[in-house]
Image (spheres, rainbow, N blue to C red):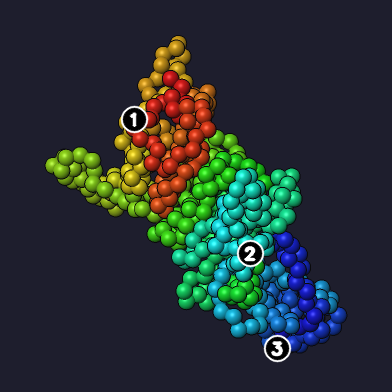
């Protein structure tokens, strides 16, 4: 064990600036003395049977725990793996990726508080009922409606300037996201390329919450906020506070990945204010804590706000489809899609062939037996009949109840350029085109636009983005307005998730070329 005065500093974006100890005391089972004793203690291992000898081999003494005690608080690493530690002659430096500070007091956990990095929207909603909340960052006079002339308009306008926020419900209690008092300045810094805290989110902890819980904060809300704002959002730390706002504990851990690039925003907070209802719907949904849904959201965020080529964006959209199909069990094997009598004959023929390969393998070399075994497994996959990507995609839109599920199954468009000589190609089904794009990206590394129609590839990417956004909305039960990520006949449009009725849809709506 080593001990001594220790300093810990974190930057506003959550990065660890310093975790250093001026070592004053070293206690070891094996004697470690001399000017380089600290270095040997941290970076070496004692040599068994040789007192005082250390080996600088591939291993080193693991830093199993590191703790800082101060007046009124205690901070310690809270991670499953050992802490990275380095040492010189008289000092040691630590690099934990997750620490928890606990503060003295008797308050019980009641609220979680999460600063938001790079969350940039136009705050316009009002919630006078949250005026006296103990964790508001700004304090103004209560809203008092007035009558007569233009005075009420001016009064509400001034009140809005100091109280605009995003209200939502968390654990059936009012919660909110509030911009910091100097939000305008911070927003400008984010838009110029910095990563800074712009707002703070406050919500209720679940009943029975304890500081030993693995999740202090519903982290998927950060991904949702990235989707709604079109910019990846991060959380540098999470606090637990009491009912009156008392600081109980703080967890330093990175959640999300704050970025500066601006992509497709699904919600215009100034126009329709749907961010709060979206969070409320998500926090009571059945998919809230599902890992597959978390992965799906992250791939959607990378496709919407991560930049990159059309291939990059499509690859994330396809992986979002696959994650959702795994989570909803739409990838499970199913009977061959033929009549039952034909199916029995096909399965019997395949089983007979598998048996014949086993007989051949008896007399084959060891290497050939392995190859034959792989062939047998491929034959068994035919009987198992795992659905194709195209089949899973159509099953997904049908399973969540999208109103255009039938229309998507019938819709087709030109996938490839005309053949040499001007001969047109046969249109491809929508799901078949998805499978063709996916195969090109995942198996051939890129889409060859000398062969594939580039205009329709972009139209498909935007169209699939809208379909998957609506899949997410249906999964969480969100019914508010959102901004379509596809071109609606070339116009910016705001709709509810059930907008895509078959009678409203055509190739022209999504800007596919004829």
How many other residues sit within 10 Å of disc 3, few (<14), some (14-19) or many (≥20)?
A: few
Q: Residue furthest top?
A: 421
- Residue at the spot x=50%, y=75% of the render? 209
Q: Residue furthest left?
A: 341
Q: Earlier in the sequence, mark 3 or mark 2?
A: 3
Alpha carbons under labels 3 and 2: distance apart: 52 Å
Tell me the tag on residue 410.
none
Q: Is mark 2 on a helix, strand or loop?
A: loop
Which residue is more in the foreground, 13 or 450?
13
**Given contact means CB atoms under 8 Å apart, are the residues at marks 1 and 3 in contact?**
no
Query: Which residue is denoted by mark 2 in the rendering?
Result: 136
Alpha carbons under labels 1 and 3: distance apart: 79 Å
Q: What element carries label 1?
A: helix
Percent of width and height locating residue 91: 81, 75
Q: Which of marks 2 and 1 is nearer the N terminus?
A: 2
| Image position of 454 with respect to 500: above or below | above
How many other residues sit within 10 Å of disc 1, few (<14), some (14-19) or many (≥20)?
A: few
| Image position of 169 with respect to 56: above or below | above
Tell me the tag on residue 29.
3
Percent of width and height locating residue 445: 53, 37
Percent of width and height locating residue 320: 46, 47
Query: Which residue is denoted by mark 1 in the rendering?
Result: 503
Q: What element carries label 3?
A: loop
Q: Is residue 121 visible?
A: no
Quadrant of the snapshot with the C terminus:
top left
């Amino acid at each position: 064990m080593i001990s001594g005065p220790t300093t810990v500093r974190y930057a506003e974006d959550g990065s660890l600036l310093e975790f250093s100890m001026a070592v004053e005391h070293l206690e070891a089972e094996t004697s470690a003395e001399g000017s380089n004793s600290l270095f040997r203690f941290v970076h070496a291992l004692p040599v068994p049977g040789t007192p005082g000898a250390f080996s600088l081999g591939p291993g080193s003494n693991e830093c199993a725990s590191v703790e800082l005690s101060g007046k009124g608080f205690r901070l310690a690493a809270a991670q499953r793996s050992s802490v990275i530690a380095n040492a010189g002659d008289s000092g040691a430096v630590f690099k934990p990726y997750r620490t928890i500070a606990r503060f003295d007091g008797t308050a019980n956990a009641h609220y979680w508080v999460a600063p938001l990095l790079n969350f940039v929207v136009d705050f316009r909603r009002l919630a006078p009922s949250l005026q006296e909340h103990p964790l508001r960052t700004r304090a103004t006079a209560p809203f008092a409606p007035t009558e007569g002339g233009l005075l009420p308009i001016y009064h509400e306008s001034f009140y809005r300037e100091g109280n605009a926020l995003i209200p939502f419900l968390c654990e059936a209690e009012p919660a909110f996201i509030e911009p910091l008092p100097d939000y305008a300045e911070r927003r400008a810094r984010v838009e110029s390329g910095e990563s800074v805290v712009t707002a703070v989110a406050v919500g209720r902890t679940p009943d029975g919450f304890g500081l030993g819980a693995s999740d202090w904060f519903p982290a998927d809300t950060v991904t949702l906020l990235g989707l709604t704002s079109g910019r990846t959002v991060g959380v540098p730390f999470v606090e637990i506070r009491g009912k009156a706002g008392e600081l109980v504990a703080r967890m330093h851990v990175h959640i999300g990945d704050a970025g500066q690039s601006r992509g497709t925003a699904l919600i215009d907070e100034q126009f329709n204010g749907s961010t709060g209802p979206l969070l409320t719907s998500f926090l009571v949904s059945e998919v809230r804590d599902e890992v597959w849904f978390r992965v799906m959201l992250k791939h959607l965020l990378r496709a919407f706000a991560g930049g990159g080529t059309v291939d990059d964006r499509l690859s994330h959209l396809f992986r979002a489809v696959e994650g959702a199909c795994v989570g909803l069990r739409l990838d499970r094997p199913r009977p061959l899609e033929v009549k039952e009598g034909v199916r029995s004959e096909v399965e019997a023929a395949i089983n007979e062939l598998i048996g014949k390969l086993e007989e051949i393998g008896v007399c084959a070399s060891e290497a050939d037996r392995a190859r034959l075994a792989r062939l047998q497994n491929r034959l068994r996959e035919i009987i198992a009949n795992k659905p194709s990507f195209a089949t899973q995609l159509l099953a997904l839109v049908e399973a969540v109840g999208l109103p255009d599920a039938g229309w998507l199954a019938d819709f087709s468009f030109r996938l490839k350029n005309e053949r040499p000589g001007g001969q047109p190609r046969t249109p491809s089904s929508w799901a078949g085109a998805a499978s063709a794009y996916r195969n090109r990206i995942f198996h051939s590394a890129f889409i060859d636009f000398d062969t594939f129609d580039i205009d329709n590839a972009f139209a498909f990417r935007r169209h699939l983005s809208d379909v998957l956004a609506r899949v997410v909305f249906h999964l969480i039960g969100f019914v508010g307005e959102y901004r379509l990520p596809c071109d609606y006949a070339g116009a910016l449009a705001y709709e509810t998730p059930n907008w895509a009725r078959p009678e409203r849809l055509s190739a022209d709506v999504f800007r596919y070329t004829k």
